[in-house]
Amino acid sequence: MTGRFIFILCWAALVALAPALGGAGARAQDLSALARLDPVRSLVSAARGGEIVLDLGLSQPVPFRAYLLDDPPRLVVDFREVDFAGLRPEALTGADRLADLRWGRFRPGWSRLVAELPGPMRIAEAAQDTGAAPRVRVRLLPVSAADFAARGGNAPQGAGGAATSALWDLPQPAVVEEPRRRQTGDRPLFVVLDPGHGGIDPGAEHGALSEAVLVLTFARELKEALTRAGMRVLMTREEDVFVPLETRMTVARAAGADLLLSIHADALAEGVATGATVYLLDEAASDMAAQQLAERHDRADLLAGVDLAGHDDAVAGVLMDLARAETHPRAVRLSQVLAGAIKAEGLKMHKHPVQGANFSVLKAPDIPSILLELGFMSSEADRARLIDPAWRARMAKAIVTAVQSWGQADAAEARLLRQ
Ligand SMILES: [Zn+2]
């Protein structure tokens, strides 16, 4: 994946910051608070020759770094955590000069801004003004596609270390281990809950409601319900931070989970779809709607710089295929039991309650993994349900029932197979 890395710019800003940090006591105290983005002093402007300038006014200087990624060409700026104060990227003056602009917490202590560029560009300047009105400025100039690609190949030796550190969350080469022994009911069932999206990636949005926050709320409630029922639960994120899809799956595998349940709430631009839907991995899912859904879910990773395209090749192996052959029917049963329990609880389901889609998060070869869309954020009726604690409690109850009953049948089958 290092080929995707095109260009990195300096920690010069950090060096420039050093004198500011050595300032008076009062100043040092100010610096301990989060830097805040000042929308009045922030904008995207354009100049002759296709130049694009991104100015970010900050309440105080912060260490930052800027670099470009390919496919599509993107600018990434990582900062020590910045409080974006609820300002939405599209509200930034001139934001429409960029195809897509996002920001948010990337991981604890760090924030990330990602902008999709109108074409191949180079960073002509990335600097921080650490004076009375601190500001990060990134100036971009268009280049040819060949020039853009060549810069990747010519990344200076010295930038190598920095480049590596900038890619802290890119997937490591997959280790093909022996598939984990499946549960036989001799210990509590171990469930990994995966609240979708988070941080830089809010997921579907409607007004002030974001899918990332909604599914996190639900996952916390569900964790409590599952724990009360005697199960072990781990969440892929406990707060509003970005977690790459592959990391979510890796967390479940590293922990030795018995199943992974990813939780989302979809939105459609058109149509009047409502109700919950259970999704299973189907790498051949060619249905247009399923494909678009997979793109909506995986696109955030692309924007955050984690492009998993082709990565599966490295993971693939005979062991994995064997494991999948055993895991898939178990996931199918889980999806059926879950859809049945949701219906039995009298909760609204989509007219096609169980569907296949090619979601990266479901690709663990040895852990039955399913994705539950609680409902559609684009539907007023579904939104009302999603924000209703009583409805969420019923949904959590249905899931607990389903997971318990699936776990028992699954353990019985494992014991049988072992004899
Ligand atoms: Zn989602």
Image: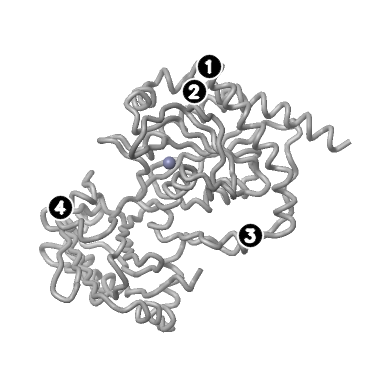
Residue drawn at x 35%, y 23% is 381
* Three-letter residue code for mark 1: Glu
Residues packed near mark 1 inside 10 Å, few (<14), some (14 to 19) or many (20 plus): some
Which mark is first along the chain, 2 or 1?
A: 1
Label 3's element? helix
* Three-letter residue code for mark 2: Met
Q: Is residue 337 above or below residue 58?
A: above
> Which residue is more in the foreground, 405 or 126?
405
Where residue 315 is drawn, which disc sits there?
Answer: 3
Where residue 395 is drawn, which disc sits there?
Answer: 2
Name the image quarter holding the C terminus. Answer: top right
| Quadrant position of residue 192 | top right
Label 2's element? helix
Task: Check the image and tell me how it is coloured.
Answer: one colour
Q: CA distance from mark 1 to mark 4?
A: 47 Å
View quadrant of ligand 1: top left
- The residue to which callout 4 is attached is 39
Label 1's element? loop
Which mark is first along the chain, 2 or 4?
A: 4
Tell me if label 3 and label 1 are in contact, CB under 8 Å: no
Query: Foreground mark, 4 or 2?
Result: 2
- The residue to which callout 1 is attached is 345
* Three-letter residue code for mark 4: Pro
Tell me if label 1 and label 2 are in contact, CB under 8 Å: yes
Q: CA distance from mark 1 to mark 2?
A: 8 Å
Label 4's element? strand
| Quadrant position of residue 269 | top left
